[in-house]
Amino acid sequence: KVSFALLLVILSTQLGLASVWQQKVNRYFLSGTQSFYSSETIFNRNGERFFLPLGGIFTKYETNLYYEYGLEDDVMFLANMFYYGLSYRDSIGVISNGGFGDQEVGIQFQLYRGVPTAALQFLVSFPFYTNPGDPPLGNSQVDFQVTALIGAPFGRTMTQGFWEVYFGLRKRFEAPSDQLRGGGTLGLNISPKVTILVSANFILGLGNHDRVDTTLRFSQIFERNLDFSLLKVEPAILYRFNKNIAGYVGYSVDAFGRDVGAGRAFKIGLWFQS
């Protein structure tokens, strides 16, 4: 049962990054983010929060590199890469695991460059490990996601801030449930160097997962029979050191969910724009 709870918690930290604004040809964007996630609670099937058994505490140290490159002015390549350090501690003992997780690569097409801006993204997620281990590094499967994005600046001079929203469908090619994914970000420029960001992202499991043999262990059942929902909220501050480099500090909270972890994460990152 402990392994079952662990995978629920890990999944709560895995929401993808998407942005409607694209890189022009031969320009690139690179960000490195370190996040520190912890949870002592979990959302059950009814969305109720309860504590992990035996005083359990799950922690996750995530190193994330995100890269965008403009192939053409309206076509962009992107890659989202993850490395994890995982541990679970309770009154019985400690188990830990580390390594590369599920990686993402994709292509994004600019549909409209006016106000608002619109784009369409095609993304593939795949495991970069042979054995997920325990706590698991991922779900050992390939996913395909199509996402529509729209966003625009706002204000009298169109420099006071911006908004963007996205909505996508993720097809999961193994037993777990397909998903609807979406969210939005509001950015407010409070000075030439500082922007306040507030993001909300959700995953909605569609319940079309395969049934499995109930004699399997909980961890096996959950990896092969995975259906969950999650709403995550993240306020953050972006500070521009110069026109190319910015720093990011954020705090993410699992606000609501079903069959998934209920934790929080502190994030710090560095962004570079060519």
Image: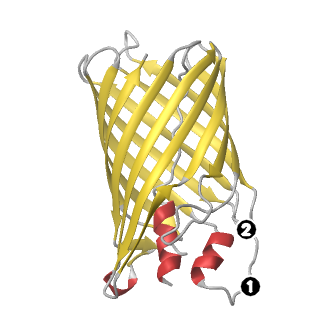
The C terminus - image quarter: top left
Image point (74%, 66%), residue name:
175
Q: How many marks?
A: 2
Q: Position of residue 226 (x, y in %)?
A: 64, 68
Image point (56%, 19%), residue name:
116
User: Looking at the picture, which amino acid does disc 2 mark?
Assistant: His
271 lies left or right of 237 = right
Query: Along the line of sight, which residue is nearer the eye, 223 or 170?
Result: 223
Q: Is any part of residue 82 visible from this angle?
A: yes
Question: In the picture shown, does residue 23 fall above or below 56?
Answer: above
Q: Position of residue 206 (x, y in %)?
A: 69, 61
Image point (53%, 75%), residue name:
46
Q: Position of residue 136 (x, y in %)?
A: 52, 67
Q: Residue furthest top?
A: 157
The residue tagged 2 is 209
Crowd around label 2: few <14 · some 14–19 · many ≥20 (10 Å): some
Q: Is any part of residue 47 visible from this angle?
A: no
**In the structure shown, which secondary structural element does the residue marked by tag 1 occupy?**
loop
Quarter of the figure with residue 207: bottom right
Q: Residue furthest front?
A: 130
User: Looking at the picture, which amino acid does disc 1 mark?
Assistant: Asp
65 lies left or right of 192 = right
Q: Work out how far the residue at label 2 is from the one at label 1, CA to CA, in angstroms.
A: 13 Å
The nearer-to-camera label among 2 and 1 is: 1
**In the structure shown, which secondary structural element does the residue marked by tag 2 occupy?**
loop
Question: In the picture shown, does residue 259 fall above or below 155?
Answer: below
Question: In the picture shown, does residue 127 fall above or below 55?
Answer: above
Q: Position of residue 196 (x, y in %)?
A: 30, 32
Residue 105: give its label: none
The residue tagged 1 is 213
